[in-house]
Image (cartoon, rainbow, N blue to C red):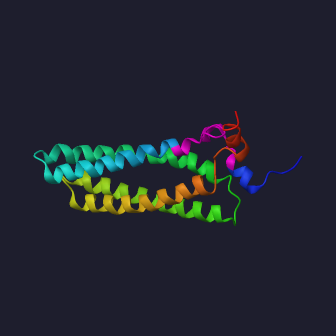
């Protein structure tokens, strides 16, 4: 039996926990922290500019926490996908940077949450940490896009894609 290439192996799930072939759960789960943290940023702006800063600051705290839970779930399945990448490859190097950036983002968001919990209302330091984390998250997201859309990691193989267009 022929051993699959490193590229072919990156398309297959290592475990059903990572999602079925062609439908990785990592790509679905990352929407939770991204959405929660962007919404927290909007809530922070409303706390700064609106008439009810305490309620929006409290909402931002909750959204940061929800994002952290979602990030942990996304990280678990992301690590399963990461484990399919052959070491020494460009894809593995970019995935490693993606992983480290996401760990930094999570650490910054934890610190942001701690600052926010310690504050009775709006936390300027928590807001600034969140902004830095969102910038790092944007870079990490770009790299994640490279992994999926340029390198085809956990994307159905070309023949499967071609079959969808050939009647």
> Which of these two is toward me, 154 or 75?
154
**Residue 121 seen in the figure:** no
Left or right side of 102 for 54? left
Taking the image as shown, residue 115 lies to the left or right of residue 122, namely right
The image position of residue 1, as x and y in percent, is 89, 46
Give the residue drawn at x 64%, y 40%: 22
Give how far across and how far down residue 134 sits, in percent: 37, 58
Quadrant containing the C terminus is top right
Residue 135: % across, % down: 38, 62
Residue at image point 55% right, 47% down: 76
Q: Please report the bounds of the magenta region as a residue range.
A: 11-27
Q: Is residue 6 above or below residue 76?
A: below
Image quadrant where residue 159 sits: top right
In the image, residue 13 lies in the stretch drawn in magenta: yes
Residue 96, percent from left and from top: 58, 62
Position of 68 compared to 16: left or right? Answer: left
Is 150 drawn above or below residue 58 in the view shown?
below
User: Number of callouts in the render?
Assistant: 0
Q: Residue at x 27, y 57 (%)?
A: 115
Q: What residue do we see at 80% from left, 51% from top?
A: 4
* Residue 151 visible somewhere in the drawing: yes
Q: In the figure, 23 relative to 147: above or below?
A: above
Q: Nearer the viewer, residue 60 or 141?
A: 141
């Amino acid at each position: 039996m022929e051993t699959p290439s490193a590229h072919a192996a990156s398309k297959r799930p290592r475990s059903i926990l990572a999602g079925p072939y062609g439908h990785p759960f990592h790509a679905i789960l990352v929407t939770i922290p991204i959405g929660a943290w962007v919404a927290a940023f909007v809530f922070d702006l409303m706390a700064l500019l609106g008439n009810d800063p305490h309620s929006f600051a409290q909402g931002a705290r909750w959204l940061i926490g929800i994002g952290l839970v979602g990030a942990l779930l996304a990280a678990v399945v992301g690590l399963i996908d990461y484990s399919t990448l052959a070491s020494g490859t460009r894809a593995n190097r970019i995935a490693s940077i993606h992983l480290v950036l996401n760990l930094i983002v999570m650490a910054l968001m934890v610190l942001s949450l701690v600052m926010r919990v310690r504050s009775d209302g709006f936390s300027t330091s928590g807001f600034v940490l969140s902004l830095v984390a969102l910038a790092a998250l944007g870079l990490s997201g770009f790299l994640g896009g490279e992994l999926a859309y340029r390198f085809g990691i956990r994307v159905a193989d070309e023949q499967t894609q071609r079959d969808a267009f050939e009647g």
